Image (tube, rainbow, N blue to C red):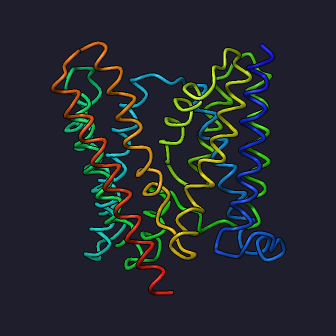
Amino acid sequence: MATKNVQTFALILGSVLVMTVVWLSSFRLGVGNIELAWHVNFDRFVLAVAAGIAFAGSGALIGATSAHIRFHILGFTIVSTASSAILSGALWGLSWGVIVPSSAIVGTLTWVIASPVLQYKKNTNLWSAALLVGAFSLSVINFLLASSVGGTFGKLVYWLQGDLLEASDYSFLALVLSLALFTWTLISKSKEVPASLLLGLGVGVIGPIFFVACVVPFFVRSLIKCSGETRFLTSCAALGALFLVLADSIPRLLIGGYSPSLIIAIGLVSIPYLLYCQRNRLLLDFPSRGRGIIEAGIILFWSVGSVFVLFHLVQFAQLAA
């Protein structure tokens, strides 16, 4: 019991310390320039912390199951295709009355076509990988096009893919609400209402970045053995806040002040991790050495490819600076 308490305390303290260092060093300000970091980064930092607590806290209450992964994969695919439909309509100069129902139809068709991923079969991970690669590619294209579209449609797509550009003085209010709702989950016997409100708050402030709610609980369970619900929820909240702060700050630190949509940074890390978790479960229930090798190859290819792309982006940013 004492060891588990120490692990939880160390995780929370470590998360707070790392977030503080990241906040002070993002935008290449140099660690220690507190006044400038406060004016430039604080609202954005606070909003990321609030959303991280909200998403990870609600995800921990929902539960870390293999079905949880597949629902998030399907949701990511639907959001990506619907965002592409919105941008396509905006580029064609269509009105709201056409774009909204069209994007809803595209999202519905995506649900119908991609819904087999919800079935738990031996080839589920291969289908998941195909959907994730397609959805991630669309997310990158959507991010590049949203800036050229601009206006309300551009902001809507940014929000759908995770955006902290609207951080303002209200960010601190979001953090207060997030902490209040999270405290409610700890003391309440019925978790459904506060969990739903937490999830709604996270979506409201930065968009439907549900991968945080999926990845963090899995990672916490693999990192420390939290038998108590309070320890598990608290650990997830701390790591969720850290996860979103890093997803926002590291690209800005590496590339030079600007970052892509959160879903792009999160996807680079989350996609191979989720495929790895699902692969382990599937190999237990549907043993196959050949399929296991193929899936391991996909995960390795994605991981190496991500490192390759990030390296060249950093090199380009340094040459342009």
Q: Nearer the viewer, residue 292 or 117?
A: 292
To which quarter of the image does residue 2 belong?
Answer: top right
Q: Position of residue 192 (x, y in %)?
A: 63, 24
Report the residue at 36% width, 56% height from top. Answer: 306
Q: What residue occupies the far bottom of the structure in this picture?
A: 320
State left or right for residue 57 relative to residue 311. right
Q: Nearer the viewer, residue 275 or 303?
A: 303
Q: Nearer the viewer, residue 233 or 302?
A: 302
State left or right for residue 58 relative to residue 267. right
Q: Quadrant of the N terminus?
A: top right
Report the residue at 23% width, 27% height from top. Answer: 292
Q: What residue occupies the far right of the structure in this picture?
A: 35
Q: Position of residue 15 (x, y in %)?
A: 71, 44
To which quarter of the image does residue 139 belong?
Answer: bottom left
Q: What residue occupies the far left of the structure in this picture?
A: 290
* Above-or-below relation of 97 to 218: below
* Above-or-below relation of 290 to 99: above
Q: Position of residue 141 (x, y in %)?
A: 31, 66
To which quarter of the image does residue 127 belong?
Answer: top left
Q: Position of residue 86 (x, y in %)?
A: 33, 63
Report the residue at 66% width, 27% height from top. Answer: 193
State left or right for residue 290 relative to residue 3. left
Q: How many marks?
A: 0
State left or right for residue 193 relative to residue 123. right
